[in-house]
Amino acid sequence: MAGMHNGRVSTASTAAAEPPPVPVTQPRLVVRFFRAATSSALATAISQVMLIGLLWWGAAPALASAVAFVSGAIPNFIIARRWAWGRRGSPPVKGELLPYFLVIGLAGLASVGLTTLAGYLIEPLDLSGFVRIVVLDAVFLGGYVLVFLMKFALLDRLVFRGGEGTRGARSRS
C-alpha cells in the first residue's frame, strides 16, 4: 500500500523518492525559439550575401534565390540541430534528415517562388540594377519572415520532437 512501510505509516513522502518528470516548460521553448531564430538569422545572412552577389552578377531571380537558400540551409541544419535542439551524433536519415529537408524544402520553395514571381512582375518596370536588387531582396527576406514561424513549429514538433537530447541519434564518441 502506498505510504506504508512494514505495516506502519511512513512519514517519508513518496514524491521525494522519485522526482516527478520535468515537462518541457515555456522557458525551454522560448530558449529553443531564440536559438533557432538566431541560427536562422545567420543562415539568412549567408543567403543574403549569396543572393545579392548572384543578382549583382546578373543571375536570374530563380537561380539566385535557389542557390542562396541552399547556401544558408546547410549551415542552419548543423547549427540549429545542435544548439537549438541539443542533438548530438549522426542524425538519423529517416528521423531527422529527410523530414528536415522536406520542411526546409517547402520553406525554400516559398521563398524562391515569391522571389521568382517578383522578378517576373517587376521585369516590365525596367528598374535600374540597384533598385531591382533591393526589391528582389526585400521579397526574398519577406519570404523568410513569413515561413519562419511555421518552419520552427514543424521542426520543433515533427523533426526534433520538441526536446533536447539525442533520441534516435547515434553518438560519435
Image (spheres, rainbow, N blue to C red):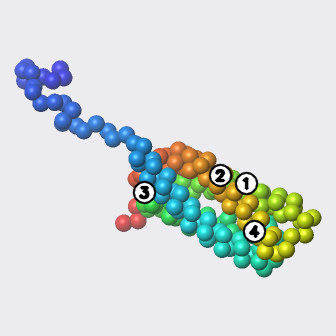
**Which is nearer the eye, 93 or 20?**
20
Tag 1 residue: 110
- Rendered position, 159 above or below 11: below
For the residue marked with disc 4, what is the amino acid? Answer: Val
Mark positioned earlier in the residue sequence (1 or 4): 1
Quadrant, the C terminus = bottom left
x, y (%) of residue 93?
55, 56
Q: Are marks 1 and 2 in contact (CB under 8 Å)?
A: yes
x, y (%) of residue 128?
85, 74
Q: Is residue 60 left or right of residue 167?
A: right
For the residue marked with disc 2, what is the amino acid? Answer: Val
Tag 2 residue: 147
Q: Give the class, few, some or many, for how many residues have Cα within 10 Å of label 2's Cα (few <14, many ≥20).
A: some
Tag 4 residue: 134
What's the CA distance linking mark 1 and mark 4? 19 Å
Quadrant, the N terminus = top left
Specify the farthest residue to the right.
124
Q: Are marks 1 and 4 in contact (CB under 8 Å)?
A: no
Q: Nearer the viewer, mark 4 or mark 2?
A: 4
Query: Residue drawn 37% across and 40% down?
Result: 23
Mark positioned earlier in the residue sequence (2 or 3): 3
Mark positioned earlier in the residue sequence (4 or 3): 3
What's the CA distance linking mark 3 and mark 1? 28 Å
Q: Is residue 109 left or right of residue 80?
A: right
For the residue marked with disc 3, what is the amino acid? Answer: Gly
Q: Give the class, few, some or many, for how many residues have Cα within 10 Å of label 4's Cα (few <14, many ≥20).
A: few
What's the CA distance linking mark 4 and mark 3? 36 Å
As helix, strand or loop, the secondary structure at mark 3 comes to: loop
Query: Residue drawn 74% across and 60% down?
Result: 139
Query: Residue drawn 10% across and 25% down?
Result: 10
